[in-house]
Image (spheres, coloured by chain):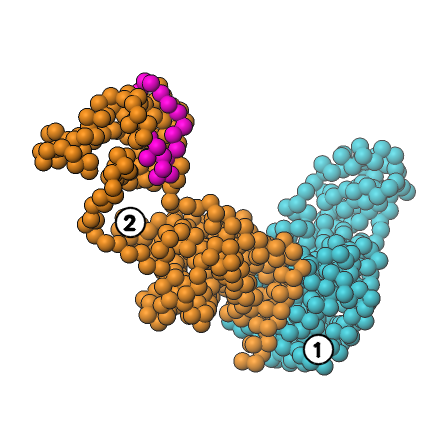
Amino acid sequence: MIKSLYRIHAILFKELMQLKRDRMTFAMVIMIPLVQLVLFGYAINTNVRHIPVAVVDHSQSGISRVLLQTVAATQVVTFRHYFNDIKQAQQALEQGKVRAIFIIPADLSKRIVRHPSVGFGLPASSDEETSRPIAQWLVDGSDTMIAAAIKGLRNMPLAELLSKPANRATTTFEVTLFYNPEQRTAVNIVPGLVGIILTMTMIMFTSAAIVREREHGNMEMLITTPIRPIELMLGKIIPYIFIGLIQVSIILGIGYSIFNVPINGGLASLLCITLLFIAATLTLGLVISTIATNQLQSMQMTIFVLLPSILLSGFMFPYEGMPEIAQYIAEALPATHFMRLVRGVVLRDVVFTEMLSDVYWLSLFTVAGLILASIRFRKNLD
Amino acid sequence: MIRTNNQDYVIQAKALSRRFGNLKAIDNLDLNVDKNRIYGFLGPNGCGKTTAIRMLTGLLKPTSGSIKILGLTLPRDAEKLRLKMGYMTQKFSLYNDLTIKENLQFIAKIYGIAGVAQKTRIDELLSIYALNQKQSQLASSMSGGQRQRLALAAATLHRPDLLFLDEPTSAVDPENRREFWEQLFDLCDQGTTILVSTHYMDEAERCHKLAILENGIKRADDTPQQLMKNIAAHVVEIEAEGLRHLKQQLANLPEIISAAQLGARLRVLVKDSVSQPIEFLSHSSAIASNKISIVRPSLEDVFITCTGETGQ
């Protein structure tokens, strides 16, 4: 037992020495979370603003100009081009110069008068036969997020248009937004990014670290020594646990200072779930290392796991919105479970013991991975 | 020191075979290695030397046959054997990004050698292998000779009874090779049994005993002196002009095993079924018999005679 610990220590110490001399890897440990965080934090924004649109104004009246100003004031769209003819506008849409066309009909004022929100007309004005929408949007619907943003304008209030006193209609439901009341994307992205970056670096570093020994011929020497596979693996994994923790600190620290992402939960809970997730991804890296024969293959397999982790784990798109089969795949990925846990702890201040099913899955994944890797790693060259 | 049961053989392999798919890498190899001896595997690249060593070190499982090493049965007892043997791989297999001392410390820890014992042993090895001045140098920046001395130091750090060396001198200049062999004999003198593979004749000649391998088959197995004495050919040298042409002419004769030019002479191996090689050559090459002489066989002649059947 003592000898076993001694051998693990030997591998661990050697790994740290090599890491210390490998400036590039060391730099990547720091740079990957830094750069990705700034990129994702600033670039990913699901609140779509300033969509370029074209206007075809058949009305050319004072009220149509006021209408345009009111729509522009929502900041959802920016009017880029003005056309007299729908054909020209459609051409601009095809060419991708604009994402939508706003068509104002010639009888705008008549339509407005009969519009229910204006409420000037007879009671029958709310009848669909007499009341029609006042203008039309033609939207490039290929990007669902842009389409949704413009669809959101469908029921925009027209009260301001007529400088009527704000006779705001009572909403059907009252909505209160917990945990991210300002609806800032970074609040959701930054904790999720912890999962993505750990998935990437942990799998890549461990799988490469073992495959490299095989590529450089060190493995042939190592397996003729008394070292046991499990000792070799533990010795290889431990330094990367610390690296993982460093990366988490960088991401959450910068997320807090630059993007104002609060850390509402307890640090102990955060440490527990992070260690668990690091263990799960590291064993996945180990399993990959027993399959891959060179570093390129281990890199390819890392990407094979990384892509679904980004797209299916709930990092980018809500898990609930995915079809059932995709949800099954997502359930198998450690990143999905960590995504729930880390958002729970960081944003909603849950203690990880309240989310046991995810904790169990990550633990199970780790144990199964370690067993599989130890079975697959044999001390011979057959 | 380990006493092997009954026999004094340190390595005993019987009818050892290994296949890779359809390729027979090792075919029916019998091997007996005495204690305290340097035993050589001589053969061209791809003849199965490395495969044989890997089977003897427990890295590869034999397809058939039995191996007994230091009283242990392989592959069953491979783990027990690891503490008693050292293995120096063909390719440098220590860490290029660690210093000499760090590499040795790493190996020492793996074998559970700690504290004062570790320090003493490493200092001892550094001075034996003249690596004292370089101990803080990265392995990647060392010369071939230094690297190979480091590898030997690492392989012998835990004082193994048995040492396997797979083409240890392929990247080393002649002077360093000579020194290296002196160190091997020192180790041998201290009780280590050594199995070494090589494709250099001069190295093979230094071994106590030698097996010549070709295509996974053992062609000969004896001391180098006996091998040269019992060579199944006459070794003849011809001094003449137009040797390239003569070589072509002779090489086609079925009685000739091989003909190779050495400067102004042509060294010819004639099958020992020919009773009068000088007369035979003089007759078939039309060269005066006083230009033809029988010379002492070298190990290379033995090698060519043994492997010539399917080679060339």
Residue A84 included in the magenta stretch of the image? yes
In which quadrant will I find the N terminus of chain B? bottom right
> What's the residue at 65%, 64% (across, down)?
A17
Count the labels in the image. Answer: 2
Asked whether B208 or B265 is in front, the reply is B208
Tint of chain A: orange
Specify the segment rendered in magenta.
Answer: A68-86
Which residue is labeled 1 in the image?
B118
Determine which quarter of the picture holds residue B212: bottom right
Asked whether A314 or B83 is in front, the reply is A314
Q: Is residue A172 above or below residue B85?
A: above
Query: Callout 2: residue from which chain?
Result: A
Q: Is residue B121 left or right of residue B64?
A: right
- Picture coordinates of residue B7, whole percent (x, y): 63, 77
What crowding class fits label 1: few (fewer than 14 Cα within 10 Å), some (14-19), or many (20 or more)? some
- The answer to whether residue B34 shows anywhere in this view is no
Q: Amino acid at mark 2?
A: Gly
- Picture coordinates of residue A164, whole percent (x, y): 25, 38
Q: Is residue A25 above or below residue A59?
A: below
- Picture coordinates of residue A353, whole percent (x, y): 35, 71
In which quadrant will I find the C terminus of chain B? top right
Tint of chain B: cyan
Query: Callout 1: residue from which chain?
Result: B
Q: Are marks 2 and 1 in contact (CB under 8 Å)?
A: no
Q: Is residue B118 left or right of residue A168?
A: right
Asked whether A280 or B87 is in front, the reply is A280
> What's the residue at 61%, 57% (across, down)?
A26
Residue A379 included in the magenta stretch of the image? no
Look at the numbered disc 1 and give the secondary structure of its residue: helix
Which residue is labeled 2 in the image?
A321
Task: Answer yes or no: are tags 2 and 1 on the same subunit.
Answer: no
What crowding class fits label 2: few (fewer than 14 Cα within 10 Å), some (14-19), or many (20 or more)? few
